[in-house]
Every structure is written in structure tokens, then in C-alpha cells.
Amino acid sequence: MKRLWAPWRMEYIKKPKEKECLFCRVIREDNDRENLVLYRSEKAFIILNKYPYNNGHLMIAPYKHTPTPLDLDEYEDRDISNLIKLCIKILDMTMKPQGYNIGANIGKAAGAGIEEHYHIHIVPRWVGDTNYMPIIAETKVIVEHLYQTYDKLKEALSSL
């Protein structure tokens, strides 16, 4: 029997749920690389998902702490829309995905892991990136370390 080791998942499993909103905390702090905050714009920011579905899994969150996009004004909406385009641009440059899943899980019933702070997921996809591992072994293989992905995307941002 072959084994695939993914020890970083244990951190997620055993970690107590933060009392403070993750997005509000990381945006207040001044250690973007450690927190995986990739880019800050006027009304929102881009952050790598620490527990990604695929390499390059990004999230965009407004600075405003709200569970729904209904509370955002037109400037916040526009900024988030522009950040989606920016994410696609830098992912295309660095990882060359063949497609994307882009969306938000609003509310616990929809699968929101952080339901109190609205955010959008940008998940790059490749033909064949779904295989037997998640089904049989309940394991997703992520081929690049988060900080390598962070550095690659940060460099792409600086070239724009």
C-alpha cells in the first residue's frame, strides 16, 4: 500500500476556530507574506487560501465585515470585480490554468467556512485535476508549497 503524507492538514483539523474574523485580523496586521495576503486595493484584498482546493486557490474579501454582498456599495463591488480580473491575469501568467471556478459560499448551508465575512473564491482548474484521490482517499494533492505559490504570484503582480 502506498501512502501520501499531508501533515499540514492536521493543523487545520486540530486548530481551534478563531474567535476573531480571519479576514479582519490579517488585514489589520503587517505581515502579509505570513498571512498570505497577496494584494491590498482600496476596498478589498486578495489572499491565498491556506487550505486550497487547487494550487493557486485565491480569495477576495472586502475590508468591510459583512456576511453578504448586499451590504457592499458600488465602489466595493467594482473593486472586487477588478480584483477578480487581476487574479485571473496573474494566474494565467504564472500557472496557465485551463479554466476557473469563481464563486462565493454565502451562509453555512451553502458551505461557507467563514460565513461572517463575505468572500469570493477563485480556483484555477486544469483538465484532469480531479482524480481518484479525493474520492478514494479523501486527500487532495497540492503540488506546490503555499509560500512558493505566494512568491510566484507576488512577482507576477509586481510585473504588471
Image (spheres, rainbow, N blue to C red):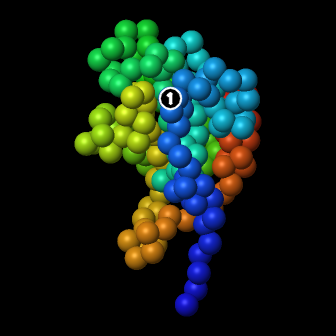
- Which quarter of the figure has residue 86? top right
Q: Pinpoint residue 16: horizontal percent, then vertical percent.
A: 53, 46
Residue occupying the point 44% across, 19% down: 65
Q: Is residue 81 something that shows in the picture? A: yes
Considering the numbered disc 1 on the image, is that residue within a helix, a strand or a loop? loop
Q: Residue furthest left?
A: 109
Q: Does residue 113 appear to the left or right of 56 in the view shown?
A: left
Q: Pinpoint residue 101: horizontal percent, then vertical percent.
A: 39, 45
Residue occupying the point 49% across, 68% down: 139
Residue occupying the point 37% across, 9% down: 73
The residue that label 1 is drawn on is 21
Q: Pinpoint residue 116: horizontal percent, then vertical percent.
A: 39, 28
Q: Does residue 1 appear to the left or right of 132 in the view shown?
A: right
Q: In what quadrant of the picture does the C terminus appear?
A: top right
Q: Is residue 58 something that shows in the picture? A: no
Observer-nearest residue: 65 or 141? 65
Q: In what quadrant of the picture does the N terminus appear?
A: bottom right
Q: How many marks?
A: 1
Decide: few, some or many residues near mark 1? Use Cα within 10 Å; few <14, some 14-19, many ≥20: some
Q: Does residue 61 appear to the left or right of 42 in the view shown?
A: left
- Amino acid type of disc 1? Cys
Q: Is residue 12 above or below residue 7?
A: above
